[in-house]
Image (spheres, rainbow, N blue to C red):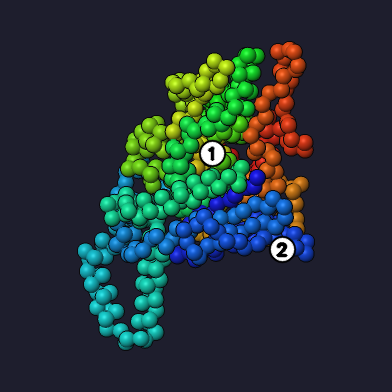
Amino acid sequence: MKTAVVIIHGIGEQKPMDTLRGFVEAVIPDKENKQKYYSKPDRLSETFELRRLQETGRGGAHFYEYYWAYNVEGTNLWDVLVWLIQFALRRRGDVPAGARPLSWLVRILGITLILLAVSGVLGWLKEWYGALVVFGPVWCSVLIMVLGVQYFLVRFLGDAARYMSPRPTNIKLRQRIRSQGVRLLRALHERGEYDRIIVVGHSLGSVIGYDIITRLWQEYAESLPGLSDPGTQARIRECQARQVDVQPVLREELGTAGARLRPGCSKDEVSEFRAAQLRGFREQRRLGNPWCISDFVTLGSPLAHSMLLLASGNEDFENRKRQRELPTCPPQSDERGYAFSSSVPVDIGGGKKFSPFLLHDGAPFAVTRWTNLYVPAPLGLLGDVVGGPVAPALGPGVKDIPVRTGRRLLDYTILAHVRYWLAVNREPSVYDPERAPVTAIEHLRAILKLDRRDEFKPSPWPKFSAGNAAVAATPNPIPGASDPATPETEAEPENTGSGT
């Protein structure tokens, strides 16, 4: 079985394969005198422009791109201005703290334009520009500046304005982008070739990734086809006879670990929850749940400002999370945690019944770990102002990691937003696995774990001693693999500057 990595690009007029090639070139370490990857036909994509990139070597990972930019057509300056006006008119309590400096900047610019219009300055500027020599140096400079501002607003904010505004004119576009993304992830699941899928979303691509994971999960949440397998049924009957819980993680461990999480909780508590997520993922796979998305990785994600983007205000945002319309990490809990006992017991043969525990439809992040990388933006204006910590908005189970790009000066400019893997320092010391990671690319390699696929296989069934009811524990059935049962074995490097 193999690992599939799906890259979802961000805003801007992206070209097919540009994001994918840059990402794969960066995350796969250089192989001495060997090619790092091959370009293969992508039979799952609906776009002929795309290819699948396959890591060289036996069992190498497969990389896919979900290219959605071609769906966004006809965006104009008015779409962006309407979005910015709605942003500026929000009350202070309905604007996330990280977006308030930008909110004030938009308001100041808007008020300035209104004052200039009322005072007649804009009319005077129009007359002054009309009197200039056509194609003269001043005339050309002003025209280039105006067109440049318009180009920036439409190209870099247009996609977000269209996708994030649920106006009637944008609903069809949103539906098309989400539907195509869901079909790609569904096809990867149904292919049967992958036992692990990683979704990586950059910028607006992280919002799209969040949406399609949320939608696809509804198809897999209560799916346990393995219960119809005679071998699985026999093992369940044996566990019942010896009074061994078949689903200890979903029944208790996962909910207990998640209940410890609070805003500002320790890294150890987050690690314990993530270890429980991995155990839950493997436990579900053991019973045949086809869900293969083990990790969701966001880079420079505007989900840090979820209240602004996904709801009309703070109260609406909290209500949507509470009602599980907006999944959180950890998921919203009921009396029994994130799972419930099936009301229809399954016949497992031998006159026995089994009532499985099922995760609810708002719990994709019960078994899918969420890691968010962001370049800090001091004062809200220096650095990646688009991204930021996601945990305060969508749950303390999100592992937020502040990173650097590898280019010190870029870390304090907006260009940091597009340099999570493109600005790679290729000195050998940067990729030293014995040193704690600092740059985004180092963290990405550690998160993807492309060389440690065995950790994500279905968990083994208990082994019982012959003729006795004692359980012989099998914590690590795979030679050489680390035991995911303890927080320390999550094997994610610590960063002294990270936090949740």
Residue at 26% x, 75% y: name it: 126
In the figure, 491 relative to 379: above or below?
A: above
Mark 2 crowd level (few <14, some 14–19, many ≥20, 10 Å Cα): few
Mark 1 crowd level (few <14, some 14–19, many ≥20, 10 Å Cα): many
In the figure, 192 relative to 482: above or below?
A: below
Can you tell which of label 1 and label 2 is closer to the viewer? 1
Quadrant position of the N terminus in the picture? top right
Q: Which of the 4 quarters of the picture holds residue 500?
A: top right
Along the line of sight, the residue nearer the viewer: 285 or 428 = 285
Residue designated by label 2:
35
Residues at badges 1 and 2 in contact (C-beta under 8 Å)?
no
Residue 359 seen by the camera: yes
Residue at 39% x, 31% y: name it: 322
Looking at the image, tell me whether mark 1 or mark 2 is earlier in sequence order. Answer: 2
* Mark 2 residue type: Gln
Q: Which of the 4 quarters of the picture holds residue 107?
A: bottom left
Residue at 70% x, 43% y: name it: 452
Residue at 32% x, 49% y: name it: 166
**In the structure shown, which secondary structural element does the residue marked by tag 1 occupy?**
loop
Q: Is residue 463 left or right of residue 130?
A: right
Numbered circle sitting on residue 100: none
- Residue 486 in the image, given as x and y percentages of width and height: 68, 29
**In the structure shown, which secondary structural element does the residue marked by tag 2 occupy?**
loop
- Residue 488 in the image, given as x and y percentages of width and height: 69, 33
Residue designated by label 1:
291
